Structures are given as C-alpha cells and as structure tokens.
Image (cartoon, rainbow, N blue to C red):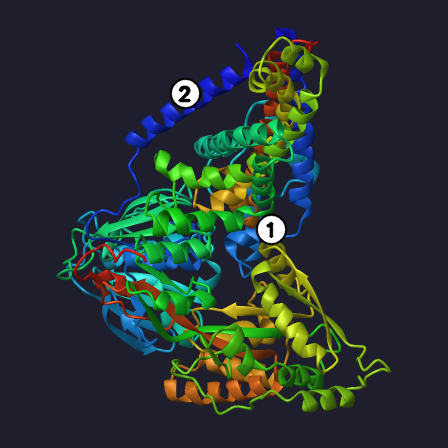
C-alpha cells in the first residue's frame, strides 16, 4: 500500500511537468501582452522595454521556459505580474476557499444522491424512481449560472434565511454548495441507481434473500457496498467538474477562491499566475483520483493495489 | 473502517469545523453608518500614481485630493488649488489651500505635489501614467503653497495633467500591487483592501465630516450583474452605478426600497473603421454603413432608452460641443445606392460581395448581432469574431480588424480628438488604431492642441466635429446615460456626467440604514 502511494506520488512529477509545459506554451502563444495590459498602449518603447526586462519577458522564450521549470523544481512558482507577490502564496491564500467550496459541493452531492439513488434503485419503475430520476434530469440540465441566482432569490431574498454572497461562516457556504453539488448529485444518483439494479440481480443477493433477509436488509448489508465501486470511480472523475464548477460558482457568489484568481490572471495575461493556478487545479485532480483508487481497496477487498 | 463509515465521519468532522469557523468568522454585515457600493471588478492599485482603471479612479478620488478635479457640470474646478493662473502658454501656477492635512495628520504642501509628479515621471517608476505626462516639462514648488507646472509646448489641455491624486512626499513606489494605500488628503482613508472581495473606506479624521454623512463606504466586488441586482433588492447594497443590466432597471425602479437616478452621461460608443482596408478607405462605403445602422431603434429597444444618439465624441455637456454637424438618419435605400456607386452592386442572389470582419468581446456579442442584421439588409456581410478581452484588445491595437465597436469613457478636453484622429497618433503615440489620416483634420487638431484661448478653441473644435461627421473615421453611435440604482434612504447623491462617485463624500443615510424587506 505504502509503495503504491509512493509510486503514484512519483507519477505526479511527469504530470506536473506536462501540465506546466502545456500551460506555458498556451499562455505564451495566445495574443495579448501583460506589459501593454499594465502600461497601456501609449507607453513609451523605453518603458515597455524596461518593464519587460523587470519581468524577465525580454529573455528568449526557451530561456523563460528554463527559468520557469527550474523554479518549479525548487518549488518556486515565480512572482505574479499583476499582484507583484509570489504565486505560491497567492494560491495558498485562495486555495482553502476553493477547496472548502468543492468539498462542500461534494458532500451536498453525496447527501442528495445517496437517498435518491437508493430509493430509485430499490424499486426501479416505481413512483419514487420516476421522481428521483426526474430530479436527476433537472439537476443535470440546470446550469450553475441559473441555479445560483434562483437559490438566492428563494433563500435570501424571500425567505431571508441565508446571506447572498461572500465567504463567511457556514451560512455563506450553503447556497454555493447546493449550486455546485446539485448537478453532481444528479449524476451520482443515476449511477447509483443503475449499479443497484445490477447488484440486485446478482447471485449473492439471491443468497442473502434466501437466508431470510428482507430486501432492504439485503440491500443495506450486501448490495450497497458492491454498488459503490462504480460510484467512487465516478466521484474521482467528477473532481475535475467540481473544480471547474467551483470557478463559475465563485463568480456568482463573489467567493474569493482560486477560480476568480485564475480568471483575473487570464485577463491580465499574468503568465506565472495562470501557470500556477492551472498547475494547482491539475495536481488536485490527480491527487483526488489517486485517493479514489485507494478508496476502491477500502470498498472492495478484491481490489489489490500494486 | 468501511467506506460509508469513513465518509460519514469525514462529513461530520467537516460540518463541525465549518460551524466552528462560522462562529469565529465575522459575517459580512455592514457596520452602522456605512453604505455599500457594489462594483464589478477589484481596483487594481491603491496608489493613485499607478491606477489607471475606472474603478481604481472612482475609489482613489475619494481618498486622494488633486490640484483640480472635474465638477458635476463637467468643468474643471480647484480641489487642492484655491486659485489658478496661466501666465504664459506653457505655464500654469496653482496656489494651494492652506491647512489641508493628509489622513496621518501631516500638512499637505507644494513639496508633496512636486514629489508625487516627480515620482511618476522618474523612469524607474514604470508608472502607466508616464505616457500621459509626456507634455509636462517640469513641476516646481517655489514655496509651500505654490506649484508651477511647465509644459514643453503650448498645451491647451494642461489642466488634465493636474488631476493626479497627491501622496505624501517620501511615499515609496509600491512594491506590492496590493499594498495598503498611502494616506491621502481626501474625505476618506482606506481602512482595508482585499482584492476580489472589498475595499473599505472610513472617514479621514483630519477632514470635517459633513453633518449626518455616511461614516464609511464599502466597495464590494460582485462580478455577477444579476447578483448585484439581488443585493440591491435585499438592501445589502445601497448603490450600483452603470453596472446593472438595462432590462432589470424598470423592475428595480418599481421596488419600494429602491430609486433609479438616470442622468446624461459622456461615455461615447462608436463604430470604428480600419483604414488599412481599401474598401473602408472609400467614404461612400463608410457613409453607407452609417446610413444602414438604425441608431434610434437600437437606443430605444436594445438600450431601453438609456442613451442618447450621438453626433460626435463630445457630448452636449462638454463646453466645446457642437451638434450642428452632418447627421446620418436610418436610410437603407441610400446606403444601397452609395454601395452601388462605390462599385459593389448586388449579385444574382441580391447580396453584395462585401464582407467585413467585426471583432468584439463576449459582452459586445449581442450588439454585434444587431449590426450584423442591419448591415445584411443593405447587402453587407459581417463576420463576427468574438474574442476574450485581452485577445480582442491585442488585435485592435495591432489594427487586426475591419470593423469594431468600442466606448470612450471620461472624455474631458476636446484634445481627445487629437489622440484618436491625428495621423501622428497611431499607437504607441495615441489611439488612432485604424490609421486614419486626413491633412485637414491634422491641421485643425494640432491648432486645437496649441491654442490656449477658449473661444478660438471652441471654433476650431466646431470644425473638427463637422469634419469628423463628414469624413467618418468613426460612426458615432450613442452617449450612454449614467444610471444609478440606489437605496431610497440615500440622500445627497449627485450624478456626474463622467460617472464620478465624488458625491459619496457627503452622502447621507436618511432614516433607517436598512432598506425595507423584500416582498
């Protein structure tokens, strides 16, 4: 197990290198100039040259790449052009907010999906199944940009239960988490339902029933655990969707996370900050997927991590 | 431990942590006597020597006083300067008010003014304001209350150079873009600045507070326009200016707790041509496009009557405005005839072989579709390219477009015409991005820039406005109104044509600070 984790962690290095190289190439290839964004289009050529030198943008591109990769190897993501602050510290300031939002979205997703999926999967074709799957369709179809303000109108404006925007205590987290978690809940619920329907037809479930267990007992004690494996796979894959969903949700709810940092950085052509944020998102995704693989072993003893 | 149990434990731990955090962290409630203004983006700099974006200017003019500023009629007025002399065409002398203090208690003197300008002009500052300061030859402080400003050549709009917020002498160049603001002599001081969240201003203790005035202002960053409207409805936010979707304004105006203040604005929307394209170099084609665009309908329907059809860059509020210029009413028949004359008769399918690339931002995409539909009626095809702003802006600067539409905000002096239409003003010398060149226009603009006498300048710019309408380097579209949606309890808000929020210095919250609950 430990060896497996270490090996997976070691695999992060080429992933990081690949993501860093790709992001570096893309941000430097798209049109737009951070120096013009800072100094304006009427800046004197001498000022433009001075700023380029100060930011190291006067070096040939391959040398800039070398500096970037060397910094990365030393754990230095460089300095943000627009904030004039180390990228790592900016991300460290904002990352907890994004993680908090994504984790809350995940929990909301699970909290909604499990009852729905189980109810639907226990009696496929029944009224509960139709209702649950109807919700799932709506959940997948409604975009964050619409659901967020809708929740605000109901819970903040009319019921006056929750604050509209900003990051604060638990009350501030409820609406963004529901916004982010609803689509996820819909996807998980559908997967769980499908998985349960298959599990219910398996031999060991028949055995459980013949032992005298009720359908519910058999499902809870034997079926659910087996039905979880594909759901966990799905959760890992959805981590990316959660992070990108957090990006939009952060804008709607004025949530000060990495997503908004990244959007601002793209607009200002803040190369180091864009590279740092994308790298942070990519590594989070990889780590979450590693955790998913570890979770398999916990759920299904047949899975051996090698 | 099995997985469901692990998950439930994790969830419980997280909820407990969040509850604890929720108790420890303060909520975003306003302190009593504060008003909240929602803004779309964060100010990029807290140091007036470096801030060039509109929202930084709005916030900084409440924190830093300048030698002169623009008043609510759109004219210059003394701020730190109690009197101004112009002894020669290249010299302005400012006599400062006495007893003005920075928020840290120090008295503001001419030395601080000289320091502020010198630190912008120093090559090592790399301030984005250096380019606009090029006409300035020197600034001197012969005594504590006199500032002498010399320009290299006679420069009529020199007072525009005197609008920089003054910082105390010795204020270092900011090492961090998000450094705390230096003390200013304005009505407020910056209590906190949290990028992408909020800027909080509190009263400058060294300035007399107008009776009953708000004790502080919270500029909260709310990027989503729908959410800004919701915050107004809930009474969390007290004021949003020019940042509300037009279709929502009547609905907000009908709410019992809100009031809409609409006033004429100077923001000028135009359609720009690229003169490097031979087809657009033909005046008949430009005129055809001007006749093909139904500006009255766009203003009435698309803009919901929140704008005025423009005759030129200068709005009627500007002292040099002259609206008696060639006008282009909607006339698609005439547009077609002009295109025929220019050698673009329609083909068998009824369409002309005339296609232009129109570049725009995602925000401008809807407007692009309106232009596309209107030009299609006269047989001009518009290929709309929607680009993210930085890419769009890079293309426009490089002249990589046929047609585009943008907006000029904050036009004060008519010398702005020089910056956009003089043939010497192609980037980086100015904003003539379409490489427009007209000898007569150049002569007029260079005379306008060097003439100090206002009456003579007025005559020159009347000719400039007529020539611009005749020769069409731009098609003038509209001047956007300033629309402020605010808490009915706010008193003392004064709209400025340039959208300035300077009147927040004396704004009052009449009665309860909380608005009526929503329905």
Residue A96 image offset from top left, x and y in percent: 45, 30
Q: Quadrant of the C terminus of chain B?
A: bottom left
Task: State whether residue B458 is above or below residue B274.
Answer: below
Residue B367 picture location, percent across and down:
59, 69
Circle 1 residues within 10 Å: few <14, some 14–19, many ≥20: some
Vertically, is B316 above or below A13? Answer: below
Residue A305 point in image, percent of width and height: 68, 10
Badge 1: chain ID: A
**The disc numbered 2 marks a residue on which chain?**
B
Element type at mark 1: loop
Along the line of sight, the residue nearer the viewer: B142 or B312: B312
Q: Quadrant of residue B54?
A: bottom left
Residue placed under numbered mark 2 in the picture: B13
Question: Residues at marks 1 and 2, common chain?
Answer: no
Foreground pick, A204 / B267: A204
**Circle 2 Cα neighbour tier, 10 Å, few/some/many (<14 / 14–19 / ≥20):** few
Residue behind mark 1: A33
Q: Is residue B279 left or right of residue A150?
A: right
């Amino acid at each position: 197990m430990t060896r497996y984790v270490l090996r997976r962690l070691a695999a992060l290095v080429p992933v990081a290198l690949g993501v860093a190289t790709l992001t570096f190439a893309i941000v430097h290839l798209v049109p737009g100039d951070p120096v013009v964004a800072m100094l304006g289009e009427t800046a004197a050529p001498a000022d433009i040259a001075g700023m380029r030198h100060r930011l190291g943008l006067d070096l040939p591109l391959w040398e800039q790449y070398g500096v970037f990769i060397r910094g990365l190897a030393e754990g230095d993501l460089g300095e943000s052009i627009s904030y004039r602050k180390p990228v790592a510290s900016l991300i460290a300031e904002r990352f907890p907010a994004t993680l908090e939002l994504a984790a809350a979205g995940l929990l909301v997703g699970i909290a909604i999906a499990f009852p729905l999926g189980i109810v639907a999967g226990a009696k496929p074709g029944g009224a509960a199944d139709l209702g649950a799957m109807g919700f799932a369709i709506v959940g997948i179809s409604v975009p964050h940009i619409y659901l967020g303000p809708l929740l605000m109108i109901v819970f903040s404006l009319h019921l006056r239960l929750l604050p509209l925007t900003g990051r604060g205590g638990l009350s501030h987290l409820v609406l963004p988490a529901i916004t982010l978690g609803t689509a996820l809940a819909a996807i998980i619920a559908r997967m769980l339902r499908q998985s349960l329907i298959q599990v219910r037809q398996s031999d060991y479930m028949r055995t459980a029933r013949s032992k005298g267990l009720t359908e519910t007992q058999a499902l809870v004690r034997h079926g659910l655990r087996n039905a979880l494996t594909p759901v966990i796979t799905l959760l890992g894959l959805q981590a990316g969707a959660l992070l990108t969903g957090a990006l939009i949700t952060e804008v709607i709810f004025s949530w000060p996370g990495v997503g908004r940092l990244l959007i601002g950085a793209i607009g200002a052509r803040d190369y180091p900050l864009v590279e740092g944020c994308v790298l942070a998102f990519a590594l989070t995704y990889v780590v979450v997927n590693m955790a998913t693989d570890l979770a398999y072993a916990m759920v299904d003893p047949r899975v051996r991590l090698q | 431990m099995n997985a469901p149990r692990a998950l439930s434990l994790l969830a419980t731990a997280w909820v407990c942590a969040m509850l604890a955090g929720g108790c420890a962290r303060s909520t975003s409630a306003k302190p009593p006597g504060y008003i909240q203004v929602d803004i779309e983006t964060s100010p990029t700099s807290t140091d007036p020597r470096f801030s060039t974006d509109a929202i930084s200017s709005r916030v900084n003019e409440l924190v830093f006083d300048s030698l002169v500023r623009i008043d609510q009629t759109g004219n210059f007025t003394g701020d730190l300067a109690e009197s101004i002399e112009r002894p020669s065409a290249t010299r302005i002398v400012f006599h400062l008010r006495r007893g003005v203090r920075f928020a840290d208690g120090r008295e503001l003197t001419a030395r601080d003014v000289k320091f502020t300008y010198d630190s912008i002009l120093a090559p090592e500052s790399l301030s984005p304001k250096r380019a606009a300061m090029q006409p300035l030859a020197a600034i001197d402080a012969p005594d504590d209350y006199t500032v002498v400003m010399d320009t290299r050549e006679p420069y009529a709009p020199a007072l525009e150079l005197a609008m920089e917020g003054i910082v105390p002498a010795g204020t270092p160049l900011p090492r961090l873009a998000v450094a705390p603001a230096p003390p200013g002599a304005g009505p407020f001081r910056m209590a906190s600045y949290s990028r992408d969240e909020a800027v909080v201003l509190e009263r400058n203790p060294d300035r007399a507070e107008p009776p009953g005035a708000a004790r502080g202002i919270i500029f909260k960053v709310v990027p989503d326009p729908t959410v800004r409207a919701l915050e107004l409805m809930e009474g969390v936010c007290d004021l949003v200016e020019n940042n509300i979707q037009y279709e929502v304004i009547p609905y907000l105006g009908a709410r019992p707790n809100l009031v809409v203040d609409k006033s004429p604005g100077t923001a000028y929307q135009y359609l720009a041509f690229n003169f490097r394209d031979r087809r657009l170099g033909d005046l008949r084609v430009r005129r055809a496009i001007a006749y093909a665009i139904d500006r009255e309908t766009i203003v009435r329907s698309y803009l919901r009557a929140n704008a005025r059809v423009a005759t030129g860059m200068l709005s009627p509020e500007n002292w040099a405005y002259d609206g008696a210029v060639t006008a282009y009413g909607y006339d698609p028949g005439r547009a077609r005839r002009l295109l025929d004359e220019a050698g673009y008769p329609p083909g068998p399918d009824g369409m002309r072989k005339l296609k232009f690339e129109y570049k725009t931002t995602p925000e401008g995409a809807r407007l692009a579709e309106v232009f596309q539909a209107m030009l299609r009626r006269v047989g001009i095809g518009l290929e709309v390219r929607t680009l993210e702003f930085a890419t769009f802006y890079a293309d426009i600067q490089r002249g990589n477009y046929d047609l585009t539409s943008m907006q000029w905000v904050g036009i004060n002096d008519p010398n702005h015409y020089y910056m956009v239409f003089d043939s010497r003003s192609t980037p980086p010398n100015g904003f003539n991005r379409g490489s427009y060149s007209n000898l007569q226009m150049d002569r007029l603009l260079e005379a306008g820039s060097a003439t100090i006498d206002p009456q003579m300048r007025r005559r020159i710019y009347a000719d400039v406005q007529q020539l611009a309408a005749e020769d069409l380097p731009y098609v003038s579209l509209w001047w956007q109104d300033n629309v402020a949606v605010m808490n009915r309890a706010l008193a003392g808000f004064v709209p400025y044509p340039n959208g300035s929020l300077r009147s927040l210095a004396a704004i009052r919250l009449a009665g309860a600070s909380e608005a009526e609950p929503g329905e």
